[in-house]
Amino acid sequence: MGYKKPDLNDAYSSINRAFIEVSSPYNEGFTSWHVKQELYNLYFHLKKTLKNTPTFGDEEEWLEEHYKNEMWEELKK
């Protein structure tokens, strides 16, 4: 059957909707905390999954470039 690439736009959209719910001043803490827990669970799952995958040839350079761009964006603020 083979690997079927997921639609990352759907994942990004779901995460963004969760962020909006967590950040909404119209939600009470109970609802917001539950949504944030779901985001944490996703984060922990991704972290565990990535930890257990092999390292590839240009991965370190790719990550370094990403972190460098992230830092520049933060410094621009």
Image (cartoon, rainbow, N blue to C red):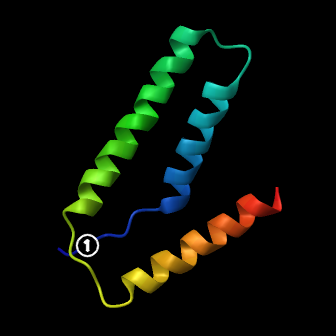
- What residue do we see at 41% from left, 31% from top? 38
Apparent side of residue 43 relative to residue 55 in the rendered image (left or right):
right
Which residue does the numbered mark 1 point to in the structure image?
3
Q: How many marks?
A: 1
- Is 51 placed above or below 13 here? below
Residue type at mark 1?
Tyr
Quarter of the image where one finds residue 21: top right
Apparent side of residue 33 relative to residue 6 in the rendered image (left or right):
right
Quarter of the image where one finds residue 75: bottom right
Q: Position of residue 73 (x, y in %)?
A: 73, 64
Q: Residue furthest bottom?
A: 57
| Label 1, residues with CA under 10 Å away: few <14, some 14-19, many ≥20 | few
- What residue do we see at 19% from left, 63% from top? 52
Q: Position of residue 47 (x, y in %)?
A: 32, 53
Between residue 9 and residue 72, name the one nearer to us: 72
Q: Position of residue 68 (x, y in %)?
A: 61, 74
Q: Position of residue 17 (x, y in %)?
A: 61, 37
- Is 13 placed above or below 40 here? below
- What residue do we see at 21% from left, 75% from top? 54
- What residue do we see at 29% from left, 62% from top? 50
Between residue 76 and residue 29, name the one nearer to us: 76
- Is 52 placed above or below 32 here? below
Q: Residue furthest front?
A: 75
- Secondary structure of the residue carrying tag 1 is loop
- Is 39 placed above or below 60 here? above
Q: Quadrant of the N terminus?
A: bottom left
Q: Quadrant of the C terminus?
A: bottom right
Between residue 8 and residue 51, name the one nearer to us: 51
